[in-house]
Amino acid sequence: MRTTELVSGFRQSAPYVNAHRGKTFVVMLGGEAIMQPGIRSIINDVALLNSLGIKVVLVYGARPQINQALLNAGLEPQYHNRIRVTDDDSFRLIKQVAGALQLDITARLSMSLSNTPMQGAQINVVSGNFVIAQPLGVDEGIDYYHSGKVRRIDTAGIRRQLDNNGIVLMGPIAASVTGESFNLTAEEIATQVAIRLKADKMIGFNEVGGIVGENGDITAELMPNMAETILYEMEQQDDHCIGTAAFLRAAVTACRSGVPRCHLVSYSEDGSLLQELFSRDGIGTQIVTEAAEKLRRAVISDIGGILDLIRPLEQQGLLVRRSREQLEMEIDYFTLIERDGLVIGCAALYPFPEENVGEFACLAVHPDYRDADRGTTLLKSVIQQARQRKYSRLFALTTRSIHWFLEQGFELVTVDDLPAQKKQLYNYQRRSKILALEL
């Protein structure tokens, strides 16, 4: 990687480091992910999240490892309604597999060798009886034996460990109030922990790194209803990926219960977890309670983001320079597009109520987001605001974007067509073109 690429990537990730610090993430490592050669890198990246001040609950599963152990012992894995039937013989093996995986993951999280990303790090990995289980019982005449479900979660105990900067590690075996143990799904544990902790994110892994759309590309964002439709279609296929479907089902439940975002990323592509969390567009699929991008009116706390957006355009002479003080006084005029807490587009409506007109000004869109017509989105919002104020006309001044305005229905006019106040301020050296749109 060239130095400039390293610097650019580091700068781009910095806002996300700040945004994620102190937040709670529930990371679900399915057994399929644990089987991959890249599992060491994934666990190192989970440890890196902890070192950046993110509170991490790591929930691991063991579905393929358990099935293989059962087959090796001459036992056929049994399911009913997609839930494992855990008899006595199966449960003895399941506890061995789950226990071994817990020790392996703890050992990897404790690694601080030289030349590794976590050199010199000291991470406390905490496991315990944070989940209290209860038996599933009998369904349609089928006894699930030692298969269970979540009854209660010690959220206060988990938070204490997270506040102590520890990583809480949970496996698929949980105890009950009667002193018995039960086999649960990692998806249920992760979902219920995320919901009850009011986690900011739940993260899972699959091979392809998300949900593949009809065009063969990874779908960047899904609302729960659309995710549910895809899940239904997936389950109609005999060869559907069980792990992906299980996480998608968990994500729908989590989102509808208040977890803002669930991410599905690749366990095959090195660094996909970090790319998803610390880059503008991510790399996987998000299941979200609301769109990642929001169109909204600006508030005083947005000034820093607006300045970051417009300063390069001001330096290029594309926008008239505005001071922070001026922006503070004019912030109510601004509308912006926000993505993941970052301002990626803005525009302003300056009022001239005496002449019943408004000025469309300070249109700026981040260079990485200029291919999706966000400028038009901002213009439509400003037009709507102008119409609500019953303005008869909208005007704009530009030196470079004349054709764009003409495409939006504006027409070229002269300085004499400007409101009197604006006419006095017109910069004849800048020689901006003046366009107007009748409302």
Image: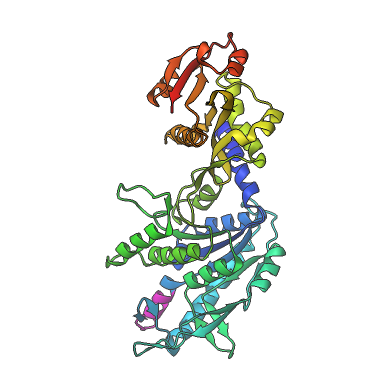
Q: Can I make out residue 35 in this image?
A: no
Total labels drawn: 0
Q: Residue at x 30, y 46 (%)?
A: 215
Is the N terminus in the top left, top right, bottom left or bottom right quadrant? top right
Decide whether residue 69 is among the magenta residues: yes
Residue sitting at x 41%, y 20%: 403
Residue furthest out toward the front: 354
Magenta region, residue range = 66-78
Where is residue 262 shown, x and y percent of the image? 49, 58
The quadrant in which the C terminus is found is: top left
Q: Is residue 350 left or right of residue 135?
A: right
- Of residues 374 and 132, the one drawn nearer to the viewer in this rendering: 374
* Residue at far top of view: 429
Residue plotted at (63% across, 49% down): 19
Task: Say above or below: 68 vs 5.
Answer: below
Side (left or right) of 96 relative to 231 = right
Q: Is residue 347 magenta?
A: no
Residue 406 position within the rendered picture, expressed as x and y whole percent measured from the top left:
40, 21
Q: Along the line of sight, which residue is nearer the eye, 61 or 328? A: 328
Residue 156 can be seen in this image: yes
Q: Residue at x 32, y 48 (%)?
A: 216
Please identify the quarter of the rendering in which residue 24 is found. Answer: bottom right
Q: Is residue 385 left or right of residue 229?
A: right
Where is 28 relative to 424, above or below? below
Q: Quadrant of residue 125?
A: bottom right
Q: Position of residue 135 (x, y in %)?
A: 48, 86
Q: Position of residue 391 (x, y in %)?
A: 50, 29
Scheme of colours in the image: rainbow
Q: Is residue 98 above or below residue 275?
A: below
- Picture layout, residue 135 above or below residue 285: below
- State left or right for residue 266 relative to residue 130: left
